[in-house]
Image (spheres, rainbow, N blue to C red):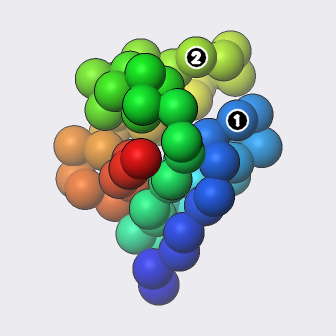
Amino acid sequence: MKLCMIGTGYVGLVSGVCFSDLGNTVYCVDNDINKINSLNKGLVPIYEPGLEEILKKNHKQKKVVFYV
């Protein structure tokens, strides 16, 4: 399934990454270009145990993609 998350705050980012880990393709959109650039580099702006590893794995497989 293809999903779109509007906003990459705490709820949107965690939900999007978790949905991608379940096998969905998730497009995360935010209007903060600095946050999107950081996420595309694998840097997570919040702390959630295990989130960074899941994000990196799924971003590498293009299961979670970040856009402005």
Q: Is residue 6 above or below residue 1?
A: above
Q: Position of residue 53 (x, y in %)?
A: 43, 27
Q: Position of residue 58 (x, y in %)?
A: 35, 48
Residue 10 in sight here: yes
Name the foreground residue: 27 vs 18.
Answer: 27
Which residue is at the far bottom? 1
Q: CA distance from mark 2 to mark 1?
A: 9 Å
Residue that appears at 47% across and 84% down: 1
Q: Position of residue 64 (x, y in %)?
A: 39, 54
Q: Which residue is mark 1?
A: 9
Q: Which residue is mark 2?
A: 45
Query: Which residue type does callout 1 highlight?
Result: Gly
Q: Is residue 26 above or below residue 66?
A: below
Q: Is residue 23 left or right of residue 5?
A: left
Name the foreground residue: 53 vs 42.
Answer: 42
Query: Which residue type does callout 2 highlight?
Result: Pro
Residue 39 in sight here: no
